Amino acid sequence: MFDFTLEKTTGQARAGTLVLPHGTVRTPAFMPVGTHGAVRGLSMEEVRRTGAQMVLGNTYHLHLRPGEEVIKALGGLQKFTTWNAPMLTDSGGFQVFSLAELRRITEEGVTFKSPVDGSMRMITPEKSMEIQWALGADVAMAFDHVVPGQSDHATALDGLERTLRWLDRCREHHSRITGQAPERQSAQTMWPIIQGGTHDDLRLRSIEGILERGPWTGIAVGGLSVGEPKPVMHRVLETLGPALPTDRPRYLMGVGFPEDLIEAIARGVDLFDCVAATRNGRHGSAWTAAGKVNIRRADLRTSDAPLDADCDCETCRGYSRGYLRHLFVAEEMLGLRLVSIHNVHFLVRLGAQAREHILAGDYDSWSRAWLQRYHSKDS
Amino acid sequence: MFDFTLEKTTGQARAGTLVLPHGTVRTPAFMPVGTHGAVRGLSMEEVRRTGAQMVLGNTYHLHLRPGEEVIKALGGLQKFTTWNAPMLTDSGGFQVFSLAELRRITEEGVTFKSPVDGSMRMITPEKSMEIQWALGADVAMAFDHVVPGQSDHATALDGLERTLRWLDRCREHHSRITGQAPERQSAQTMWPIIQGGTHDDLRLRSIEGILERGPWTGIAVGGLSVGEPKPVMHRVLETLGPALPTDRPRYLMGVGFPEDLIEAIARGVDLFDCVAATRNGRHGSAWTAAGKVNIRRADLRTSDAPLDADCDCETCRGYSRGYLRHLFVAEEMLGLRLVSIHNVHFLVRLGAQAREHILAGDYDSWSRAWLQRYHSKDS
């Protein structure tokens, strides 16, 4: 379990296979986000039909509602959501630092006020492991101290050092509650998160600290795509590349947009998640091979063309732009769903296409042509 | 085209077959309502999977948005919505009388203010025929003067007499624009609507006036289930029964709830439509064989039972009550969809079950047992 096989490298781009208790994931791969146990607007059957192999669940949201004990009583997150395939849960760290009100951070953990019932809650590294073990995803994430995106050196250092101390606690507690030594995991593994903001030296210090505490079955990069310029994200990934073990999957958290996938895959990333696909879908903004399309555009009123002529998702196979536009203008829920399905499929397929071209050895030329076409117009 | 074959009568309950340009409908049958060209919250593929044979579209809403010319340009309502099967459009009469603001009623037609763009619009009998012909459903409805549900005798008489005068204009205009004589229709037929409120004598006068103007391929009953007590609706249906031709389908507009279908089928009704299935679904109120279930109920939190153990819809086959409850509490769109699918399937299946028992000759005993179980608890 949790085996990762690197099949082929083209430049820094990697094609691999990750074996998890609930199935196998061919990488590079995009994971749709099921915040509340559903990918917003979609059924899990629709998510499956996009070709998605692995779905992310949010520990923070699921802990607050319905609570991990409910999900455990109903057979765990896979059975509860009907997604009987690989899943990963985040640790709640990003959410308690970015969403929660009235939070108080100590060495012990983070105290915050539940937006659901106003009660005071505390998530510690141990608590995060317990919640995630009850949820039962294939991959749990370490509980990290997330600092704002463009924090200064001292703040970023403080965050990464606490993250390393918390990683020790996560690891110890995860081993204890799962009854699994790190090298003999069978039901759930746990991955550490590299922090360090936009400071290359801190990023390297973070990965060094993580590897000292190894082995790990995978490693995540956190704290990117949080407002920093894109070239900075690219530079951090280039800095990390040589320091990362080649035989472990690399997960870039919270990324991204289509162009982000292309650029990050070129820099050695294997796994992605992001809510942009469904968030943009709900707002009628669709990704296509020729750039973005705002489905509310007046000139689409009588268009019988599909949303994206290059796409084989159920939205593009079944519906006209004119009908999709009408659904958005008339505020029919079906519209949000259909464009979200397309956007999720677009990112999933982009991962699969990247994989094909890595295996074929022409990722570099293919990806440059892809970006050129994608940026050729912005409609 | 538009042939109706009465296969079997058990008491007053009827099993029939209606042949329409886009397909065949076995009756009794419930038609889900696609107000804006979509059954709210569902894809047409999902509607098909409920077993629905025929869908209703709303002329008033589609005229305002996106406009019949857009739908015509995109191939008509069936192609536009991907519902490539029998459809019926209402005339807009009910909506201009019940929903529209600033309406002015004259012998010519009804003037009202569009809630979409504030423009003044007029729907006349001729305009309604033109809109419906552009939409292209199999069955168009006559434009009727709808009076409030419990109008006095004089008001109801006034409404039904205007409805008869408008029926002449509808018939003449529909023949002209479709190029079809009433007895040689091939692409779209048009059905008259019986009015007369809760006054038996006026109901009989209405049907008499309609039959004088015949032949028709079907006849609708309007102005019921608009606030009158249920026994009054049953009495009106019993009054109309003997006066209606047996060889034409009978459509009870805007009805209903499960118990309404059972009672109206017993009184000879063949077709139904109502938004309650999806409206209740969006509010988390589900119909089951054992009565209503409010899916938000706290005791369903960890229930792994299906919504309705007797049901084979995709919601009941795939999801637990506990998950459905969570989706509603977390306000995930998927919840509204799944309970709406169940409710639509519930009414569609009720029509199909009624048909089986009419054909088997035991509708009366079956329907009494069905109602007893349905009313056995109200949760």
Image: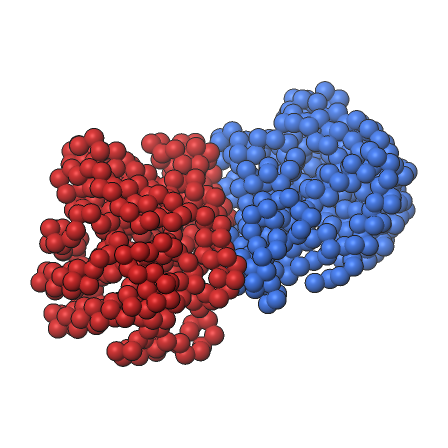
Chain colours: A red, B blue
Give whichever of B217, A369 is nearer the camera: A369
Q: Position of residue B231 (x, y in %)?
A: 85, 55
Residue lying furthest left in this view? A201
Q: Tell how many labels.
A: 0
User: Which residue corresponds to the image point at 12% horizontal and 73% vertical from the top-left?
Assistant: A154
Horizontal side of residue A228 vs B326, given as left or right: left
User: Which residue corresponds to the image point at 61% horizontal and 49% vertical from the top-left?
Assistant: B316
Q: Position of residue A215 (x, y in %)?
A: 22, 57
Q: Is residue B333 visible?
A: no
Residue lying furthest top in this view? B184
Give whichever of B67, A27 is nearer the camera: A27
Q: Position of residue B141 (x, y in %)?
A: 69, 37
Q: Position of residue B248 (x, y in %)?
A: 80, 31
User: Which residue corresponds to the image point at 56% horizontal and 47% vertical from the top-left?
Assistant: B318
Horizontal side of residue A231 vs B219, given as left or right: left
User: Which residue corresponds to the image point at 60% horizontal and 63% vertical from the top-left?
Assistant: B300
B166 vs A108: above or below: above
Which quadrant holds the C terminus of chain A?
Answer: top left
Horizontal side of residue B179 vs A187, given as left or right: right
Give whichever of A302, A261 is nearer the camera: A261
Q: Is residue B344 visible?
A: yes
Horizontal side of residue B327 vs A6, given as left or right: right
Q: Quadrant of residue A170?
A: bottom left
Give whichever of A379, A123 is nearer the camera: A123
A143 vs B173: above or below: below
A220 vs A155: above or below: above
Q: Quadrant of residue B352?
A: top right
A143 vs B355: above or below: below
